[in-house]
């Protein structure tokens, strides 16, 4: 049985920019290769906390 992947937090070590990617199903889409703010790469990648993931979903829901 497939297990849903956890949301990932991408963070730029140079400027502190953050982006959370919430996978739909078991496929990762939209993962940044470099910082969208300053262009630095590589980005640090770690699992997003439940609070961070819930806040992102709430903000996305509010925008639609």
Image (spheres, helix red, strand yellow):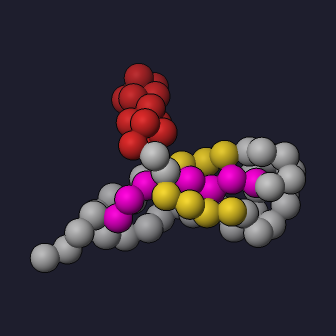
- In the orientation shown, which residue stands out farthest toward the bottom? 1
Quadrant for residue 54, please give it: top left
**Count of residue discs:** 0
Using the rendered image of the protein, determine whether residue 60 is visible from the camera's viewpoint.
Answer: no
> What span is colored magenta in the figure?
5-12
Please tell me whether residue 20 is drawn above or below residue 51 in the rendered image. Answer: below
Using the rendered image of the protein, determine whether residue 35 is visible from the camera's viewpoint.
Answer: yes
Which of the image's four quarters has the C terminus? top left
Give yes or no for residue 52 being in the magenta stretch: no
Q: Residue at x 47, y 64 (%)?
A: 29
Q: Position of residue 8 (x, y in %)?
A: 50, 57
- In the orientation shown, which residue stands out farthest toward the top? 62
Q: Position of residue 40 (x, y in %)?
A: 85, 61
Asked if residue 4 lies left or right of residue 54, the reply is left
Please tell me whether residue 11 is drawn above or below residue 55 in the rendered image. Answer: below
Q: Position of residue 13 (x, y in %)?
A: 80, 55
Q: Residue at x 54, y 49 (%)?
A: 20
Q: Position of residue 35 (x, y in %)?
A: 76, 56
Q: Residue at x 41, y 23 (%)?
A: 62
Which of the image's four quarters has the N terminus? bottom left
Asked if residue 11 lies left or right of residue 7, the reply is right
Please tell me whether residue 18 is drawn above or below residue 5 in the rendered image. Answer: above
Give yes or no for residue 7 being in the magenta stretch: yes
């Amino acid at each position: 049985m497939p297990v849903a992947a956890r949301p990932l937090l991408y963070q730029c070590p140079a400027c502190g920019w953050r982006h959370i990617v919430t996978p739909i199903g078991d496929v990762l889409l939209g993962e940044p290769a470099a910082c969208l703010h300053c262009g630095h790469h590589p980005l640090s990648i770690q699992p997003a906390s439940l609070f961070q993931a819930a806040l992102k979903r709430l903000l996305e829901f509010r925008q639609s």
